[in-house]
Image (tube, rainbow, N blue to C red):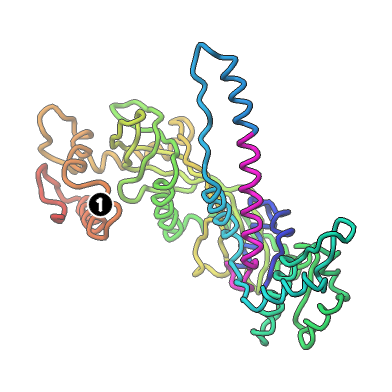
Amino acid sequence: MIILDSNILKGTSLRGPEAELLRVIRTAGVENVVAPWIVLEELAAQQALAYEAKYEAAEAAVLKLKAATPWAPVPLPRRDPPERVRDHWRGRYAEIVGTLPTSASAYEQALFREANLLAPCKTVNSGKHKTGARDAAIWLTAVEYAREHPQEPVYFVSNNTEDFGDGTSFQSPMNEDLDGLRDRFVLFTSLDGVLTKFAAESPVPEEELTSLLKLEESLSDVARLAIKSAIKGRGTVIEFTDGEWREVMLRRWIGKPVVDLGSVSDIRSHEIDGHQWSTVTARWLLCGYAGIFRGRRSMDYAPVACSWETRVLVSPTAPLKGLTVLRQERTTPLSPEDDPKTVMLLLETSKHFADSMTDPPQGLSSAEADLQHITANFNFRWATESDAGRHSFERLLSRLEAKETVRWGDELFDDE
C-alpha cells in the first residue's frame, strides 16, 4: 500500500508524469495508492478557499468596470457554492488515489497527542498555540493500516521531515508506534523513491503501440467512452449536410461513432511487476450520427466528424487489461483537408444509412430522410440511456449492416 501525505499530493501536478505513473501503478494492480480521508478533505478545502478569494477579487474588479461602463450591462461571473468546488477537487484527486478511512480511535489518539504535545504534534507562535492533530491523524492512519494488514508492506510518502522525520529515525512516541513494523513500514520523503521502486523505464516501439491501439477491441472501447464523454462535455464537431461542412456543438452520439486512430505522441513506457505499461497521447478520428446544437437552443441530428485527443494507458504484455483513458480533451472539428481518410469514412457512414432507406417522404433527399426517420421513430434520450432503446437501435444497425432494406414507416423500435 502506498499512502500519500497532503504535501505530496499538493505538490504533484494532476496532469503531470508523476500523477500519471501513480495511476499506472494503481491500474497495474501492483500496489494500491491511497490518501487518508483528512488529506483529501484538507486539499479540497484549500481549493475552495482559494476559489472564494479569487472570486471576491474578480467581483471587485467587475464592479469597478461596471461603474465605469454606464452605457452597457456588465454581468458578474457566476459564483459556485463552496461544496461544488470541494466536490470537483475530490473527484480530481480520486482519479489518482483512493480514500483510506481514519478510525475513531486514531482521531482520539491524534487529539490526545496534540493536547499533550506528543510527536508529531508541537507548538507554534513561540509556544502559544498547539498544533499537529491532523498530522498525527495522518500518521496514525498509516500505522493503523500496517498493523491491521500484517502481510502487506506500507510505503508512507511525505516531505514533512520536520514532523515525521526522514525515515532513518523517529521521535517518541512515533518510534514506539512502529514496534514490530520496521521491516515493512517505509517512509519516503518524495515520490521519486517510491516511483523508482515500482517503475523502471522500458521503451516500447511506437509501431507496436499503434498496432495495439488499432485493435478492434481498442476502437470499440474508445467509441463507448466517446459516448459518455459527449454527454458530460460540450465539444465541437463538423457536420456534413448538403455537401457543406459546418462547425457545430456536439450534444451526444446516436449509437457508437466510427473510430479510427489518427496519430500517437508523447509515449512513456515503464516496466511494472514484469509487464510493460505505456502511456500515450492518442488522437482519434470519430464520425457518425450525432445530436448537435446549431444555436443556443436549436438541437438537430446530422452526420458529423471530429478529432478527440486522449491520454491512454495500454500494456503490450498484458493486453487483457485493455485500454484505460487517463484523461481526455473535448472533441474538436476535423477539417475536410485534415484527413481525407476520415472524411471518406464519414461519407461512407452517411451513405450507408441513406442508401438503406427507401420511399422517403416527398420533398426529402435520401440523406435527410434517414435522419428524419430516426428522430421520428424513437425518443432520443430513451434510446441512448435505456437498455431497451440501445437494443432497438443496435437492431437497426444490424439490419443496415446486413444490407437489408429499411422502408419508411417500418416498425424498427420496441414500443416504450
The answer to whether 187 is drawn above or below residue 93 in the figure is below
Q: Is residue 155 visible?
A: no
Quadrant hosting residue 171? bottom right
The answer to whether residue 245 is left or right of residue 337 is: left
Q: In the rendered view, tell whether residue 39 sits above or below residue 54.
A: below
Q: Is residue 197 visible?
A: yes
Residue 391 sits inside the magenta stretch: no
Residue range of the region highlighted in magenta in the rendering:
27-56
**Percent position of residue 46, x then y:** 66, 51
Quadrant in which the N terminus is drawn = bottom right
Find the residue positioned furthest to the front: 128
**At which x and y percent is residue 385?**
30, 54
Image location (x, y in percent) of residue 100: 61, 71
Which of these two is toward me, 404 or 375?
A: 375
Residue located at (59% from left, 69% from top)? 28
Judge left or right: residue 88 versus residue 403: right
Whether residue 311 sits left or right of residue 408 in the image: it is right
Give the residue number, with chain letter if any, for mark 1.
383
**Residue drawn at (59%, 30%) of the image:** 59
Q: Quadrant of the C terminus?
A: bottom left
Label the magenta part by its dominant secondary structure. Answer: helix
Q: Quadrant of residue 402?
A: bottom left
Residue at the image position 56 percent from the left and 14 percent from the top: 69
Three-letter code, disc 1? Ala
